[in-house]
Amino acid sequence: MAFSSAISSTVCFHTNPLPTSNPIFPPKRTKTNRKTLAAPAISPLSIAADVSAVVAPLDKTALAVIGGGSVAVVAALLSLSDPEKRRQLQAEEVSGSDKEVVKEYFNNSGFQRWKKIYGEADDVNRVQLDIRIGHSKTVESTMKMLTEEGSLQGVTVCDAGCGTGCLSIPLAKQGAVVTATDISAAMVAEAEKQAREELLAGKDELSPAPVMPKFEVKDLESLDGRYNTVVCLDVLIHYPQNKADGMIAHLASLADKRLIMSFAPKTLYYDLLKRVGELFPGPSKATRAYLHAEADVERALLKVGWRIRKRDLITTQFYFSRLIEAVPA
């Protein structure tokens, strides 16, 4: 689900310019036509003077990106923010842990937001549209990895964290035997609905219909069975590294040939963006978002006898995700 990746939850940005004066930090004399350095992958945005104006459009995992603001301002804001307390209150509301918060979110407001982002609706803002494009590129790159070595006809694939079926449906169209799971019952129902519409509608007697994916409501910990390939896109964002290690080992234990995963890469720059984004949580409940260093993911794979064979980095203006294909070492 996406930092989104985007980081697994969506993010809206406030783009109003800074006020011309600041009572705390007086304006400095600057030259006109000053050049501004553009940040890679994500455009620099302004700090909003009116926080309420920022919060209104924000959609949780939203990243508020600061450009042009002083480091002192960022540090001050971060020191006043208490995102951990906010998350604790969210978990208490649903009487559970991170997993329960994720489940609650993607069965309710999160489902509506991500259904719209993953779909083809026109009523999306430019950030959501950009995230849609980024996620589509991740799916395309995944399909390329999967088909480079031959046909998928009859190949068993587990799509762990299938969302609305963005990957499961293309896999089925290629002849793969797909098991698609998600922690959200709402997501699974939507994925099955879309699969029936795309895979079964308009079929004729001359060409065999694709095999419908087997859709199940399951979290990653509950997955079982054996598959040629296991795919898990934009889900690790919901797991801290100590739990991600165990989850990577579990997913690898289900795969015979390949494990494909995507995650929000942890770098100094992206980590700062995430922390700044936590200052503006938005009006609705959101999920906790974890970034992962590529070295940590690779170490977890090596520990269970797997190695990374292929890598890709998908970035748009508001979406960034590291995609890897691992095979037995």
Image (cartoon, rainbow, N blue to C red):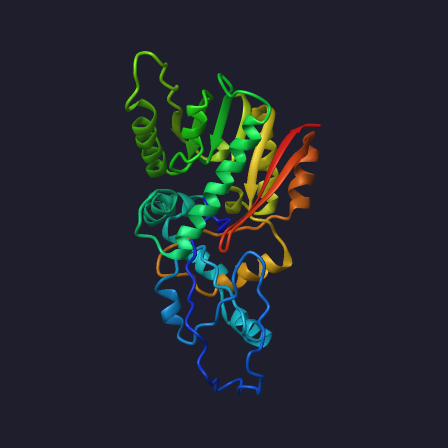
Q: Give the tally of numbered discs.
A: 0
Q: Nearer the viewer, residue 272 or 126?
A: 126
Q: Is residue 216 visible?
A: yes
| Residue 263 coordinates in the image, percent (x, y) | 56, 44
Q: Residue at x 49, y 37 (%)?
A: 139
Q: Quadrant of residue 270?
A: bottom right
| Residue 255 coordinates in the image, percent (x, y) | 58, 25
Q: Is residue 310 above or below residue 152?
A: below
Q: Residue at x 46, y 83 (%)?
A: 20
Q: Is residue 224 visible?
A: no
Q: Residue at x 49, y 55 (%)?
A: 318
In the rendered image, the residue lying farthest to the front is 33
Quadrant of the image containing the C terminus: top right
In the rendered image, the residue lying farthest to the top is 206
Q: Residue at x 43, y 76 (%)?
A: 49
**Relative horizontal placement of residue 47, taking residue 108 as reference (left or right):** right
Q: Nearer the viewer, residue 13 or 33?
A: 33
| Residue 91 coordinates in the image, percent (x, y) | 42, 52
Q: Is residue 243 above or below residue 249?
A: below
Quadrant of the image containing the N terminus: top left
Q: Is residue 183 above or below residue 10?
A: above
| Residue 316 coordinates in the image, percent (x, y) | 51, 52
